Amino acid sequence: MTGNDGAGDGRATRWAGQRAKRRAEIVAAALDAIKAHGPGVSTEQIAAGAGIARTRLYRHFDDADDLYDAVAQGAAQAIIERMVLTFASPRGSAQDLITKSVRTYVAWLIENHALYQYVVLRTVDAVSGRDPLIVDVRAAISAPMRSLLAGYLGVFGQDPAIADPIAFGITGLVESATNRWLAHPGPLDLDALVGNLSGWVWGVLDAALRNLGIQMDPTAPLPEVAGESPA
């Protein structure tokens, strides 16, 4: 390799690092713009929040879909950071953990409803040949729960394969019910919503465990367990 080749590689590495840093800054600005302007935020408003011209956005993103994907992943990361704290060191009973995790997720959806709606609105439908973004985000959100469930199934001597569909389904249940409640609150207050959802989540888990021949007292203290990687 010549000296010039080395210099070129160094410039390419620096540019890649600068591009990644700038992408992260723009995604952060986009999240703020969504909170300020709602789910219908324009690329002009995102660019203004990032302090650049709209046309310069695409120096850092391949196209609009690339920008939307990055924002969706930023949304997922925000809730994952909260959920990981809930599942990383479980304390108390299954009932305690379920109620805590449901309340955490519901609170995030309420606080970030515009961001959630943005992800839904920007979801690419199946006609384009791309998977919906909301499915990717839901899968990422359910990963910490999947990890913990897989760990407990291992303790019971069971195959952890069912942890993924259970966690994904529970995430969808809480998400769908909460968004319906936000649109049509009806007679339920927040505590009643969380209480009902927690009971339904336990019902799903209890049915799955009983199918494996496992009976668990939801009020008994949980054993310590290390989950698999949520990646």
Image: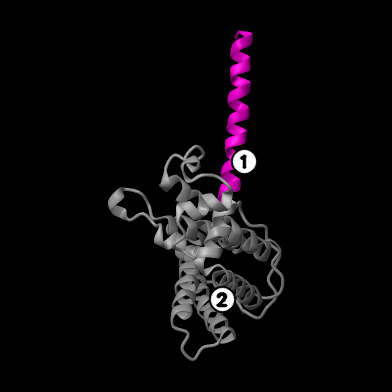
Report helix, strand or loop for mark 2.
loop
Picture quadrant where residue 190 is located = bottom right
Element under disc 1 = helix
Q: 19 or 43, which lies in front?
A: 43
Tell me if mark 2 has few (under 14), some (14-19) or many (20+) residues whose alpha carbon lies within 10 angstroms of its own.
Answer: few
Residue occupying the point 71% across, 74% down = 92
Quadrant of res 21: top right
Where residue 22 appears, as percent x and y from the top left, is 59, 41
- At 59% from the left and 64% from the top, the residue drawn is 156
Give the image location of residue 25, x and y in percent: 61, 47
- In percent of width and height, residue 31 lies at 56, 57
Residue 41 located left or right of residue 16: left
- Residue 161 visible? The answer is no
Q: Which residue is mark 2?
A: 215
Instruction: Select label 2 or label 1 by which is in front.
Output: 1
Residues 111 and 76: in front is 111
Q: Which mark is residue 21?
A: 1
